[in-house]
Image (spheres, helix red, strand yellow):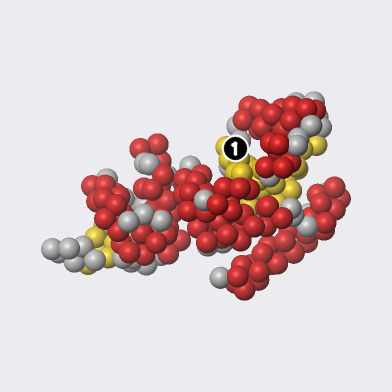
């Protein structure tokens, strides 16, 4: 996983540098991402999602006062607006100066008011609770699933459809369970709900369903 991540990460950064015309963002990318952001991508995002598609590091936005702001990671599938900020305990909680704290709150408020989905992730959680962080990421990505029935789906159901779309083949419950970080029994419950909603169909098995695939209606 580490070697694969390093290859994907290197290509991802190089591509952003090649495509970026903004000198301010290019300089930030050249300096390299923060330690917390790289660890988050390596140990949480990449294992959970399997790619770095639609992610943009040090993404530039302007706030209500026309000041430049930079997001640790912007997730923008199909032009949607998702922001992930990796918050270090030392910088964001214990030793932070009053002015800096107020500025961070203002930045978060601006993002929410500008219709960004905002996901703050504590570095300590990345280190101590990776399983929980992966579930948060899956739920976050599930919000961007572009189908009409998204509002009727919980995070596990939405991520199952995204997983099935990316896979483009039949899959077993144990594969999905490993991806969702849920038990196989709980995963089968998720699949049953999607079968009832006609979003997923059974590909094989009668007494005990063995494989599933995305419905032809999607």
* Residue 152 location (% of width, % of height): 35, 38
* Residue 56 location (% of width, % of height): 68, 51
Q: Residue at x 55, y 52 (%)?
A: 128
Q: Residue at x 76, y 35 (%)?
A: 96
Q: Residue at x 31, y 62 (%)?
A: 173
Q: Is residue 69 above or below residue 132?
A: above
Based on the displayed image, in which of its 4 quarters is residue 18 positioned?
A: bottom right
Residue 143 visible in this rendered orientation of the protein:
yes
Q: Residue at x 42, y 59 (%)?
A: 179
* Residue 34 location (% of width, % of height): 74, 53
User: Which residue is the extreme one toward the bottom?
Assistant: 3
Q: Nearer the viewer, residue 15 or 39?
A: 39
**Number of callouts in the render?**
1
Q: Is residue 154 above or below residue 214?
A: above
SS under mark 1: strand
Q: Nearer the viewer, residue 115 or 133?
A: 133
Q: Nearer the viewer, residue 80 or 36?
A: 36
User: Dot 1 surroundings within 10 Å: few (below 14), some, or many (20 or more)?
Assistant: some
User: Which residue is the extreme one toward the front?
Assistant: 94
Based on the displayed image, in which of its 4 quarters is residue 197 positioned?
A: top left
Residue 76 visible in this rendered orientation of the protein:
no
The image quadrant where one finds the N terminus is: bottom right
Q: Is residue 182 above or below residue 92?
A: below
The residue wearing badge 1 is: 118
């Amino acid at each position: 996983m580490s070697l694969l991540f390093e290859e994907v990460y290197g290509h991802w950064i190089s591509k952003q540098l090649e495509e970026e015309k903004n000198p301010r963002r290019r300089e930030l990318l050249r300096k390299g991402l923060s330690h917390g952001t790289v660890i988050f991508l390596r140990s949480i995002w990449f294992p959970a999602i399997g790619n770095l598609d639609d992610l943009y590091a040090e993404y530039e936005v302007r706030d209500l006062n026309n000041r430049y702001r930079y997001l640790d990671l912007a997730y923008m599938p199909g032009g949607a607006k998702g922001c992930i900020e990796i918050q270090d305990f030392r910088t964001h909680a214990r030793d932070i100066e009053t002015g800096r704290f107020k500025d961070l709150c203002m930045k978060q408020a601006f993002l929410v008011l500008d219709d960004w989905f905002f996901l703050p992730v504590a570095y300590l959680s990345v280190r101590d609770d990776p399983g929980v962080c992966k579930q948060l990421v899956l739920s976050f990505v599930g919000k961007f699933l572009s189908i009409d029935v998204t509002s009727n789906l919980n995070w596990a159901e939405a991520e199952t459809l995204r997983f099935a779309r990316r896979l483009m083949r039949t899959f077993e419950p144990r594969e999905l369970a490993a991806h969702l970080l849920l038990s196989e029994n709980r995963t089968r419950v998720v699949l049953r709900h999607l079968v009832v909603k006609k979003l997923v169909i059974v590909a094989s098995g009668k007494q005990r369903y063995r494989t599933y695939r995305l419905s032809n209606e999607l």
